[in-house]
Amino acid sequence: MEISSRDIAHLAHLARVAMDDDQNESLAHDLTQIMGMVEHMREMDSSGIEPLVHTQTAEQRMRADEVAWRNMREEALVIAPMVEKGYYLVPQVIGGGGGNTE
Amino acid sequence: MEESNTSPLALNGCDDWEVVIGLEIHAQLLTNSKLFSGTTTRYGAPPNTQASLIDLGFPGVLPVVNAEAVRMAVMFGLATHCDISRHSVFARKHYFYPDLPKGYQISQYELPVVHGGYILVSCAQNEIKRIGITRAHLEEDAGKSVHENFIGMSGIDLNRAGAPLLEIVSEPDLRSPAEAIAYMRTIHTLVQYLGICDGNMQEGSFRCDANVSVRPRGETRLGTRTELKNLNSFRFVEKALIYEVERQIQLLEQGGKVIQQTRQYDPAANITRALRSKEEANDYRYFPDPDLLPLLISEALIAEIEAEMPELPWDRRERFMREYGLSSYDSGVLTAERQLADYYESVVREGSDAKLAANWVMGDVMAALNREGLSISDVRIIPPRLNLLLQRIVDGSVSGRTAKEVFEIMWNEGWDADTVIEQRGLRQVSDNASLEPLIRQVIEEFPAQRDQYRAGKTKLLGFFVGKVMQKTQGKANPQQVNALLSAFLDE
């Protein structure tokens, strides 16, 4: 599977990563190679094998629903470029997520 | 605010077009701490005071799943006939927005915690519809952007970042905005009964996205859909859906095409506006979160949760009909909110007649709450006191009409019924000994009317009743006055 420099530009945009043409081309080349390996792996018969989502075999531990936290606002706000009234300030965003999960 | 162009066609569907709606409901789970951190989820704290390093997405931290959130998701799954995944996976959903500190949201994608269930919804004309629940998955909430108070900038509050959400996705089984609302209300009632969400829409604890399309009636393929985002009140959901359905029908009837896009409802203008189209649609690049191992839910845990399930709203509704002899409608009203049903049931358990109590709770109690914009948790008359008032109606101490007056005084001033009745002299006069002389006196005062009555003009009975009630200041028992008057007039 050929990964084009358009694919790379699209991914870079999605990841908000700046990239020049040289980097783009070299990445397109590398990823095409990697995809070739993936395609090779796909030729294996994997029917009957459970998909592996994690290399660890352990299961997720859960924690009790207990509150344990402290107010870290002042420590956190100092690393932000702009703050006001306890809020982080960012260039105006309207619409989009609108403050809710997608 | 503009009035909605509520056309019954759009609300209930129309002849030529079939409406297809699916809802994604986000219910914030009522845990003490966040989904992956120990930070409190308390609402209303000053901005950014409830955001820990995990919530802020600092490097080197490790999320750990809140067991209670998992329990709650399982409860929802059991209540909606879903399969509970013995093995489910948390995935990262990537997008960039200032209120999403990590640049991804921990959610579930291919293997959600519950899936493949349904819920029965009472729609118009008492029709019961089975609405499919595709899935419900656990995910963390984002923060909040505030646009109003900052000139040319937006303020970000991350207190809500990491709060536990259950995203409940329906099948596209809803055929009108009215059905969508009925479904949403059913889920709203259910999550409150289960005690897994407070259902508070103002605070954003319960909100909804809608996928909407229309197709010519008889067509089996789905039309192109649009997605309406962040609808946070039942009224807005209904208005937004009605607008969007009409917009799509008009567009298609004029030979146009619906474009697949995300739209936002503007309540002030009562329209929906395009946010982004499919070409710009987000590609979330989901993948299993390497910080989190697969979530395994044991048979033992499921059995334990099943044993602790509270009575579900539809079961309670059935029981109210069976046990208290209430109509389906009355039971529906009384069980729509768990706290209201609890209140009603406490009044009955105090000893009140079930039907009388139902009439009073749905009548005077709910009217008083609505008048003052209060919810049932703010009710001013506790069940034993309402019971006492109802007992006083049954034992004849007060008439139903006077009881309403007593109720108002109890509501506003906080006394119990007996105190109000005694202090205001509202006790109904129902002993014959004190009524008889009074009635004879009234008959003597109006000899002309008495003679006319005796000559056959029996309608005048009402005139005499009125006079007696005047003299007793409404305290006489009307049935008794009627009986005594008829007897004396016919002498």
Image (cartoon, coloured by chain):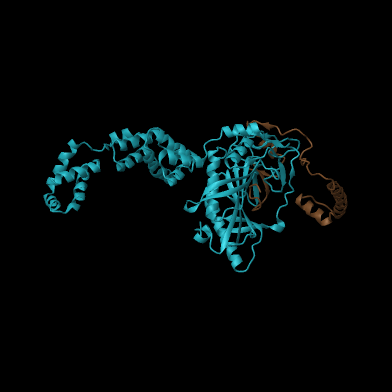
Chain colours: A brown, B cyan
Residue B382 seen in the current view: no
What residue is at 56 percent from the left and 49 percent from the top? Answer: B130
Residue B112 falls in image quadrant? top right
- Residue sitting farthest toward the bottom: B254
Of residues B49 and A42, the one nearer the viewer is: A42
- Residue B490 lies, in percent from the top left, at 14, 46
**B140 on left or right of B191:** right
- Residue B83 lies, in percent from the top left, at 64, 41
Residue B427 seen in the current view: yes
Q: Quadrant of the C terminus of chain B?
A: top left
Residue B384 falls in image quadrant? top left
Figure disc tally: 0
**A29 on left or right of B403:** right
Of residues B301 and B200, the one nearer the viewer is: B301
- Residue B252 lies, in percent from the top left, at 61, 66
- Residue B380 lies, in percent from the top left, at 41, 37
What residue is at 83 percent from the left and 45 percent from the top? Answer: A45
Residue B61 falls in image quadrant? top right
Of residues A66 and A47, the one nearer the viewer is: A47
